[in-house]
Amino acid sequence: MRIKSGIRLATFAGIVAISQGALAQQEPIKVGILGQFSGPFALIGKQYRQGIETYTATYGSKVGGREVELVYRDIGGTNASVAKRLAEEMIVRDRVSIIGGFYLSPEPLAVAPVLTETKTPGVVFNGAAKSITEASPYIIRSGNTQFQMGHVEAEWAIKRGYKRAYVAVSDYAPGYDLLEAFRKRYTALGGEILGEDRMPLNTVDYAPYVERIARAKPTVFKMFIPAGAPSVNMVKSLQAQGMTGRKDLAIIGQAQLEEAVLNLFDDSVVGMYDALTYSIEAPGAENRKYKNAMRGKFGAAELPSFAGATAWDGMHIIYRMIREQEGKPFDGTTAINAARGFSFEGARGNVRIEPDTRNATLDIHIRRAVKGPDGKLKLEVADIIKGVKSLP
């Protein structure tokens, strides 16, 4: 069932109220998961599912006296309108009480009006644009914002003496946020921005951009592009321009390098840095639980991942919403209020949902690609910046 633009808010809200009222008196409670399970970002969807399944295998599929039933829907690519349609169908037809997941920022932004109309909580595992939580009071973000990342990365570069930067990002909202955050903090600390590029999100050829970056001769190159094939293409372009493996140039990405995808790269990435809110090597009991659950359910060949860890932590929030309403009809507003100020140890470290922004205060890990004793690529933790607020 698709909700057409002409349908009145009262009618739609009434449908949902009836369906949720009926749901409150029966098992299970349904949680919708919107993700990229096919198409160019299918790896993220796979990792989301792994994180969710390892979480339920560890903590059980029952919480707050109710069985949790997961309903997966595939966005299949960079199509925000599909995300909105699927959210509408899950709420009205499948009668889900919460929607989690999301990957690219346009997805939760498109779904936000639906969540607001129906008072359905949305837990955004990934999607870093600042405007996401501003788009609906029913959105909680368990992932990071680009203001967190850009602020920390700028400080990291300056502290290590990299005073001349070039920044290249994908041409969509999180990229704009990162540019703004990095530029503001970097220049305030005395750094010089030599150039900025916004690259099409679906580009496969980074050579023209990298040629321009090489001519500028920066001491640090900050990039933000999708993980997987786009990142591999970027590294190949950097290598072709002689920009990899240099001691006078620091290259730092954001989820471009991760243990789960290191096998896609060759030794040209040795010495490159990556900033992320998760590291396999990070200490903590919850990370150990996540890693052990991954190993037990999927075997040693499937490595713990950033996307899986964000899904694991997102499930902590979803379970909190359900647990806090044990014995009562599920209510979306009550669920959101239960998540405000919620602090817990997640797979990514300490997580706190900020009551005012509904974003997460998180730890940020700076990792460096090295060759291990076995000759294989690995990421070593260079620094951990703890308790970074969503909007520093």
Image: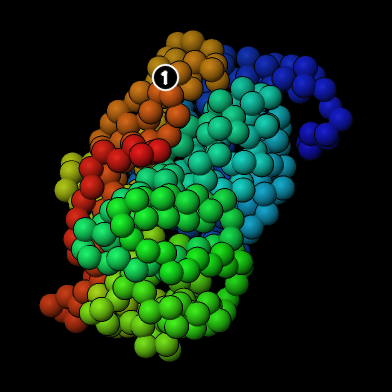
**Tag 1 residue:** 338
Question: Is any atom of residue 293 visible in this view?
Answer: no
Circle 1 SS class: helix
Which quadrant: the C terminus? top left
Determine crowd level at label 1: few under 14, some 14-19, many 20+ residues with C-alpha closer than 10 A: some
Rendered position, 6 above or below 111: above
- Left or right placement of residue 51 versus residue 129 in this view: left
Q: Residue at x 49, y 10 (%)?
A: 328
Which quadrant: the N terminus? top right
- Left or right placement of residue 146 versus residue 273 in this view: right
Q: Residue at x 39, y 85 (%)?
A: 239
Rendered position, 265 above or below 242: above
- Left or right placement of residue 49 versus residue 71 in this view: left
Q: Position of residue 142 (x, y in %)?
A: 42, 38
Q: Quadrant of residue 275?
A: bottom left
Residue type at numbered disc 1: Ala
Rendered position, 137 above or below 326: below
Q: Position of residue 103 (x, y in %)?
A: 52, 50
Query: How many numbered marks, from 0 up?
Result: 1
Q: Position of residue 221 (x, y in %)?
A: 38, 70
Q: Residue at x 54, y 12 (%)?
A: 329
